[in-house]
Amino acid sequence: MASREKSKKHIPRDTDAGTKTPGSFKDKDMQAVIGWILRIGVFVSTAFVITGGIIFLFNHGHSQIDFVSFNKVPDFIGHISGVMDGVIHLKGQAIIQFGIVLLIATPVLRVVFAGIGFLIEKDYLYTFISILVLLIILTSMISGHAG
């Protein structure tokens, strides 16, 4: 019995347990939200890619592939409005492309929510770093340069 009580004394405890007030936002909460954003983003984008692949194979599975001439990707995939229009009209390639865009956007959302979390925690240095990372990502996306 004494060894059982002794082992309880050495268990590290969370100092915030039981002292959390409603409305307070802790670092663990932010990490949990970011974790869920990443999981949901990956699952949703995977669902779009698989659905688009099934639709594409259903519509083009019987087609013969011409390996002699190169056919570029359709024009509607080159810009987001064309992709969204293709998703609405259930075009398989557009749905796959939309899933890939969602997959790329997921870590960007992670940076956005990390910045919001740092702002709530009033950690202005990391808020500034998050905004700087977002500006670098947006500049790269708009300019088309990777680095």
Image: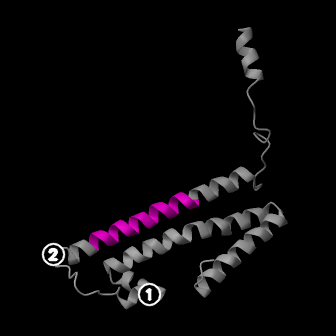
Quick check: 92 above or below 82? above
From the top left corner, tell me how far across and down residue 113 is, in percent: 67, 66
Say whether disc 1 or disc 2 marks the residue closer to the N-terminus. 2
Q: Amino acid at mark 1?
A: Gly
Q: List the single residue furthest toward the bottom.
A: 75
In the rendered structure, which segment of residues is drawn in magenta? 37-55
Image quadrant assignment for residue 121: bottom right
Of helix, strand and loop, which one carries label 2?
loop
| Residue that badge 1 annotates | 78
Image quadrant assignment for residue 124: bottom right
Name the disc covering residue 103, or none.
Answer: none
From the top left corner, tell me how far across and down residue 57 is, in percent: 24, 72
* Residue located 46% across and 60% down the image: 43
Main SS class of the magenta portion in the image: helix
Give the quadrant of the N terminus: top right
Name the disc covering residue 62, or none.
Answer: 2
